[in-house]
Image: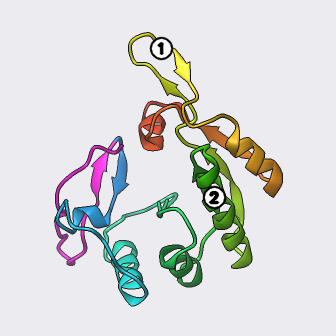
Amino acid sequence: MMNLKGNPELSQNNLMRPLLNYGIACMSMGFLIEETAPVVWRGLMVMSAIEKLLRQVDWGPLDYLVVDTPPGTGDVQLSISQNIPISGAVIVSTPQDIALVDAHKGAEMFRKVHVPVLGLIQNMSVFQCPKCKHRTHIFGADGARRLAQTLDLDILGKTIRYSFAEEMAEGRWG
């Protein structure tokens, strides 16, 4: 979790300034709409939001731009892959069978639109009790490993906590 809330400020050239935490600049639709409002968009509305988040934000110099999309093969993924040059996709999935089906479809969709799939990350692979440190595979084990073998991909990592960004900030990801 990036632990960010609030509305972005505007720069002098009328671009939104991303919110910062852990030294990472972040922009989200969640910063632009009411907290409890659902985002129920398709087609042109999705592309308009993507354009706003990519091109109307004062990102400054970037080494990498990571775009976190919802799971699946919907308008968001297709719009991004057709309108923005992408170096590669990383598929993130929990180890449950139903989540792995979506991850498999997502990887195949990116391959079909000629976006290299760089590998898989298994999110929430282990629950660790904060008190006794006992680890339990509450969502199953090795789902991403099996999917990676099926798709001939590498496993890039496994997370213990829900938030990959939190683990990155703690230095567990290089």
The residue nearer to you, when weighing 14 against 72, is 72
**Would residue 7 be counted in the magenta stretch?**
yes
**Would residue 52 be counted in the magenta stretch?**
no
Secondary-structure class at tag 2: helix
The three-letter amino acid code for the residue at tag 2 is Ala
Instruction: Classify mark 1: residues with Cα within 10 Å, few (<14), some (14-19) or many (20+).
Output: few
Relative to 161, 9 lies left or right: left
Provide residue 174's location: percent of width, then percent of height: 57, 36
The tag earlier along the polypeptide, 1 or 2, is: 2
Relative to 114, 166 lies left or right: left
Residue extending furthest toward the bottom? 44
- The residue carrying mark 2 is 103
The three-letter amino acid code for the residue at tag 1 is Lys
Residue extending furthest toward the top? 132
Question: Vertically, is 45 above or below 163?
Answer: below
Instruction: Classify mark 2: residues with Cα within 10 Å, few (<14), some (14-19) or many (20+).
Output: many
Magenta: main secondary structure equals loop
Provide residue 40's location: percent of width, then percent of height: 33, 75
Relative to 168, 59 lies left or right: left
Provide residue 152's location: percent of width, then percent of height: 83, 54
Secondary-structure class at tag 1: loop
Check contact, mark 1 vs mark 2: CB within 8 A.
Answer: no
Q: Give the magenta-colored segment's residue range.
A: 1-21
The residue nearer to you, when weighing 67 against 11, is 67
- The residue carrying mark 1 is 133
Q: Which mark is residue 9?
A: none
* Whether residue 76 is visible: yes
Answer with the quarter of the image where residue 137 lies: top right
Residue at 62% x, 56% y: name it: 91
The residue nearer to you, when weighing 85 against 11, is 85
